[in-house]
Amino acid sequence: MLRIAIPNKGTLSQPASQMLRDAGYRQRTDPKDLICRDEPNKVEFFYLRPRDIATYVGSGDLDLGITGRDLLVDSGAAAEELVDLAFAGATFRWAAPAGTLTSADEIGGRRIATAFPGLVERYLADHELKADVVRLDGAVENAVRLGVADLIADVVETGATLRQAGLVTIGEPLLRSSAILIGRPGHNASGTAQLIRRLQGVLVARSYVMLAYDVRADLLENATALTPGIESPTVSPLHREGWVAVQAMVQRAEVHRIMDELYELGARAILVTDISNCRL
């Protein structure tokens, strides 16, 4: 039976469980449950602290896990990213008092406060820099004002909290994180390939919609140039002479622009349908 770690709480928890439901896997109904067995799919889910998941997977006690890229890097565990699940995005950046630092090259020899010491230490090692890393569990923005550090490394969203603390971001991000599926290098437990296919099907379904429309046959080439589909659009003759029906998958973010351009071209009966899942 495939053993998979799932975040038990926090911003990763609900989206991870929902994605697995969309992929056809049973999930717990009581948030207090620590284990959920999905017998038909031969999978057992373990609900753990997000920070611990990479450790369990890296040690081989569990086969796979869903966690954040930031948490994987911070843990230093012997696990690797298998699939980017495209939710829970986060950007890690340096921040210091305005006017004190101009680039990340100047952080050497300084005190850096962070809740992700492993991530920062890896960055320092990769860039051959030395600095004192001060580990804090949260609210690192106040570390500089309180004299604990010279700069911080933390998740930055709007930057409002940094501005309140008198800090500005420096240089490029340390890391762009999101939720990921992780496993051990070389791991190939039974059921892993199926899980990955299903998750990738959910990702495609969330990014695409099915677009259907009618168009005159003499306009078909121009119309399908707008809707080439994943491999090729489906084209069927209509009872109305000289007209065809077209179906194609298009990117959700582009669908309204495409609909407008199809209408201007002469297409009619333009319909959009959500895709709940797929296999390509």
Image: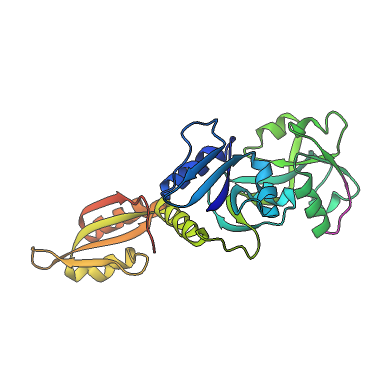
**From the viewer's perspective, is 94 left or right of 157?**
right
Given residues 145 and 16, the one toward you in this image is 16
Residue 166 appears in view? no
Q: Residue at x 71, y 34 (%)?
A: 162
* Residue 194 picture location, percent across and down: 46, 59
* Residue 226 picture location, percent across and down: 33, 64
Q: Specify the quadrant of the image occupied by residue 114.
A: top right
Q: Residue at x 83, y 33 (%)?
A: 144
Given residues 219 and 273, the one toward you in this image is 273
Given residues 77 and 4, the one toward you in this image is 4
Q: Residue at x 65, y 46 (%)?
A: 53
Tell which residue pokes out farthest to the right in this image.
109
* Residue 62 picture location, percent across and down: 62, 51
Coloring scheme of the render?
A: rainbow
Given residues 27 and 143, the one toward you in this image is 27
Magenta stretch bounds = 127-132
Q: Specify the quadrant of the image occupied by residue 228.
A: bottom left
**Predominant secondary structure in magenta?**
loop
Q: Specify the quadrant of the image occupied by residue 224.
A: bottom left
The count of marks equals 0
Residue 15 appears in view? yes
Q: Residue at x 87, y 33 (%)?
A: 148
Q: State yes or no: residue 128 in magenta.
A: yes
* Residue 227 picture location, percent across and down: 32, 63
**From the viewer's perspective, is 226 left or right of 106?**
left
With respect to residue 248, does 179 lie above or below? Answer: above
Q: State yes or no: residue 195 in magenta.
A: no
With respect to residue 251, does 71 lie above or below? Answer: above
**From the viewer's perspective, is 159 left or right of 198?**
right
Indicate the quadrant containing the C terminus: top left, top right, bottom left or bottom right: bottom left
